[in-house]
Amino acid sequence: MARPLPVARIVAPRSVAVVGASDDVGKFGGRVIHYLQKHGFPGRLLPINPNRATIRGLPAYPRVSAVPEPPDVAILAVPAATLEAQIADCAAAGVGACIIITGKLAEAGPEGAALQDRVLAIARRAGMRLVGPNCLGIFNPVGRAMLSSSLALEEENYAPGSIGLVSQSGALMGTLLSFGRHHGARFSCCVSVGNQADLGLEDFLEHLVADEATRAIGLYIEGLREPARFRASLHAARAAGKPVFIVKAGRSEAGAQAARSHTASLAGAFPAFEAICRDAGAVVMEDPQAMVLACDAAVRLPRWPAPGLGLAPIASSGGSTVTFADMMPGVGLRIARMAPETRAVLGRWMPDSHVALPVDTGSFHEGTSGDGLAECIRAFMADPDVGAVVVPMTTQPDMAGRTALFPPLAREGGKPLLYLMTAGAVGDASRAVMRAADFPFYDRMADALAVARALDAAAAGRVAGDAPLRPAGTGPASALPSGVLTEGEAKRLLAAYGLPVTREAAAATADQAVAAARTIGFPVVLKGVSRAVVHKSDLGLVRLNLRDEDALRTAFADIIAALDHAAPGAAEGCVVQEMARGEAELFLGATHDPQFGPMVIVGAGGILVEFLQDVRMAPAPVSAATARALIEGLRVAPLLHGLRGRPPADIDAAAAALERLSWLAADLGPRLVELDVNPLILRAAGQGAIAVDARATLKKEETP
Amino acid sequence: MARPLPVARIVAPRSVAVVGASDDVGKFGGRVIHYLQKHGFPGRLLPINPNRATIRGLPAYPRVSAVPEPPDVAILAVPAATLEAQIADCAAAGVGACIIITGKLAEAGPEGAALQDRVLAIARRAGMRLVGPNCLGIFNPVGRAMLSSSLALEEENYAPGSIGLVSQSGALMGTLLSFGRHHGARFSCCVSVGNQADLGLEDFLEHLVADEATRAIGLYIEGLREPARFRASLHAARAAGKPVFIVKAGRSEAGAQAARSHTASLAGAFPAFEAICRDAGAVVMEDPQAMVLACDAAVRLPRWPAPGLGLAPIASSGGSTVTFADMMPGVGLRIARMAPETRAVLGRWMPDSHVALPVDTGSFHEGTSGDGLAECIRAFMADPDVGAVVVPMTTQPDMAGRTALFPPLAREGGKPLLYLMTAGAVGDASRAVMRAADFPFYDRMADALAVARALDAAAAGRVAGDAPLRPAGTGPASALPSGVLTEGEAKRLLAAYGLPVTREAAAATADQAVAAARTIGFPVVLKGVSRAVVHKSDLGLVRLNLRDEDALRTAFADIIAALDHAAPGAAEGCVVQEMARGEAELFLGATHDPQFGPMVIVGAGGILVEFLQDVRMAPAPVSAATARALIEGLRVAPLLHGLRGRPPADIDAAAAALERLSWLAADLGPRLVELDVNPLILRAAGQGAIAVDARATLKKEETP
């Protein structure tokens, strides 16, 4: 066979050797072959067992190298102690790829890591691919290739579907398959990648993006080995119209620590990861169960029309609709604003006083609830502000019959309908109706909310942003300093990229300061300069709003004294600056992420940035439109639009500054450690923005 | 019988007449009698039907008044058109209480409301109690009195339990019963109160607090009719050691609107409601399903030891434990900080590098996972920082056997163990183990998180706060003005209660202003005074930091001009104030809630209060300790403790100011419309706080 075996063939092999095959389903190898048979593997099955002539009715071979024709795939769930020999035998036999379920390799410590390295070396030499070790294998209902020992395969009839999964946790994947099956979700191909000695998440993601059967992709990620390839695959998925939903372990600090200790993968910084995903249109979620439901909704429900639309909850229980509506703002969802036409339709079925969302069909005129329900849902489907209809159903007579109304209404209307059945067993008849209709249902309000939020985010991610075009007058910065820059050096760097900075002049004496202030114009700011001091204002090294010569001279003497105290010997004099005032402040930042490269950050300015943690990040460079969207996405954005009669701030100028900063970050590349502008003062709309303070740290240029 | 029939007898009647009884379970009345029989009603069952001699094997009566002995309870699911006559017959027959399932009464409009009023009048005249109308009745597994038409009763064997529920939505209640049953939750008494024409939520809550079988209480509330009685019952429940978990409809604006249109109840302002509940130790939740799970955890799990403790997640899947840990901070939970003893135990079972929470038992030394798991859980149970252990289980060999380990470990350890089974049908064997062990399980990470958060909140609510004691030098305020007060009037009111306010003096001319400033000491603040202007700073009527006479005179002229422009004819001169500076700002407020009386509010100061909506509220008066806890509960609290090397602010002084303000609110009573102190400037710790601006609106004193 052609080597190396392509991933598409590994997930759908023509022949599979099961090493350690057994009639005993209590053993890993016994389960693997049992599941392959049970789920109808269509290719050739080759049990490997030195002690048996036949296993489960199939002729057995003592070792893989005894099989007449090299199998595409060998699957191994053998003790770690025998793994190396078995892999060597597979390599000798010409196996295309080994799926290694065996654990206690790199994840268990240095000894296991050394064994894993030896196994990998054997495979590399032979041109043989590896999946795992420490994985649960591959689950391919489309090709009926269940190459896994997961107990999720105890369930019957995993029908082929369109959801592709890649998971860096095997047990979690098995659990999610069983969970999805309860909801009627169907999968195309799911892969547990384990320790990724050879093939990893990026390989299988690339496969799923290309795979015809796969229409939505779910990823459980602990760390990335090939961030650039990952990013490219997300962009390719968007281009292919396949939404990607991701849960990233290690969002929280405790989680990040555990993810590091648990696998041999890198738990990259979460904010940069999330920014990269958002930029590529992928949706980062919190809950793996909700991720599976979101994938399923993306393939089985009509499309959420556009981002930012509202929800229309309707059901026969005021209690369930109101509670659902109450939970929406907490996850960033809102009630739809009904069009007059929609209100008119509702008015036919209920008193005018009740025409409002959410709709309680209990308020319908007597005896009209079935027809009224259908008509209202049709009206919502036609309403341009409705993103999806939600039916939080409670126990009621003829639940199953009522339930059957919804799938055709959603399909006819062309928008998602989220059907919630929150009861226990008494709701099972309704769930069965939905399974039979091949339509999703949800058991929890929280599930439906998470799905709605994910579908909305996927709609936002469908369209790629403007390509960033280099603005005139950005760089290149020449003669770069290195190390911790002074404020003046940092500002000159910004000015070279066209960012407006405060006018300023250095002053070694009080007389020089006065002369500078006369040129700049009172009032002025006086700052002490020292490379050794980061937070100048904490040490009394910044004096604002100095209105005249006397005030300036007094401040000068004070600051020189404070400098001598704070950083003896490191004082570099003072700088006189223009006193900038405006309507609002932002923080702008840039950095070079070790995984994802140049990034820009924007957040609330001043002390709020540290406190509120209200920041947005994006890979650099960004277009002006993306820069503006980042700013508008901040929680403090309402402050910029003018609160309590204040004039709105110049957001366009801030967006332009962020765009220019992003080019600086892109051009600096790995030399950039960090660059902060804090604050950027925004004047009233049309009057610009100005960088009042800046600091930066650059690495030395590496000599080639 | 003694009239009126007590609630304890209504929920456990000796005899029940079913009006409209039928052999047809498709009819409401048919279902009611069927369910009563099916679930083993032990009292006398009296079918009422004019056309039948027997129904379901019981002698039938043509009307209630034809029954020889007056039944305790009659249950009616008759058309609205015949309701009035039936109720009249029940009244004539001497029925103790009617449960009216019939809808289309007050909730449906003026016509229905009139009918409901007439029905109530009939009952009142006869001393007969009513439950409903528009309710789903009473569900009493302890007394085997299932007085309901809810389809949840299709399920078998509702075993008696300890969870009491009162719901203002009937359909939601039925749904919750079936949902709870799936989890093995068992109920003592559940009541759907419907339109509350007579008996309402407050009556049944009072019953459940007194009821011996009930050990935890869940409430679904749309509005309160008797807020003071409700509040007293919450305090009584705390005293009785019964945790109360509440979902309040109308938290969101859309929800509030829908709750108003859907029942005849008042949707009170949510923040005041929540403050009252927290003050009484009750836990306000978002999700009704999670509320049932929290009630169940409170009765079937050992007690969460104390508020603020951490969680210890442990399981065989790194993926599930890390994901769970990642979701914790989002709901205000944290990982436990392990004691050295705990670390030592863990170190016996896994490499030192892996000793961290969450624990992945996959990292245990080979072949030790069962014993290691038990030992680690015992160590967590003994660790003082662990509030609960969480086991987010995924599919694995012998899941059911492993599952059986946990209930004894939790019971022995005396702390909650939250067992999560997130798989679908493949996890059912484990769920069955837990049901058999009478131990809770959760199907969703989000469910376990919501339960943990609720148990932690219930622990915080178990202990009543200090009783507020009137501080020396608070009021009474004499000769109160009314209407919109000037800043000076508002500050005099504050000063009368011992709140520190800025020194200030009125100035009608610039000369007077200069004289005042010399007395107060430069720099000063100058403000224009007008009752017509609320947001002074928006109109240029406030000038800060005036350092000398010249600056003051210029500012005076400017402000007089601005006043003439902003409020022609309403100018009341200027006021010269001390220029206060400090480390931080807070907003303090007081109001008189129409339902709950005097309330105080504290939040982030300045413009942030409106923007961040970061406020805490409590019923007034409050103790200094409570005042401090409110301040510490703010999201901006870290700012007060000193960020970036700033000195910590005087939180004690702020708490004292809030305490004094709370007594002012309590003394003003309903005369208080609103009173804001914004900002209260906090100086460095030990140096006090000062009210810099204040405004208030008081109603006229009502003449008796």
Image (cartoon, coloured by chain):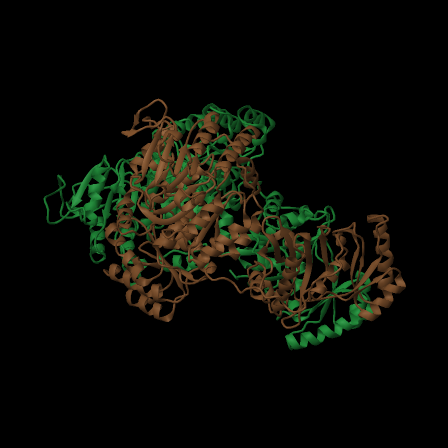
Chain colours: A brown, B green
Q: Position of residue B588 (x, y in %)?
A: 61, 55
Q: Quadrant of residue A688?
A: bottom right
Q: Looking at the image, which is closer to me, B201 or A399?
A: A399
Q: Looking at the image, which is closer to me, A403 or A247?
A: A247
Q: Position of residue A430 (x, y in %)?
A: 27, 48
Left or right side of B620 for B473: right
Q: Position of residue B589 (x, y in %)?
A: 59, 56
Q: Is residue B340 above or below residue A418?
A: above
Q: Position of residue A404 (x, y in %)?
A: 25, 54
Res. B187 visible in picture: no
Left or right side of B67 for A288: right
Left or right side of B384 for B505: right
Left or right side of B198 for B359: right
Res. B293 visible in picture: yes
Position of the N terminus of chain B, as image quadrant, is top left
In the displayed orientation, state which residue is furthest to the top: A51
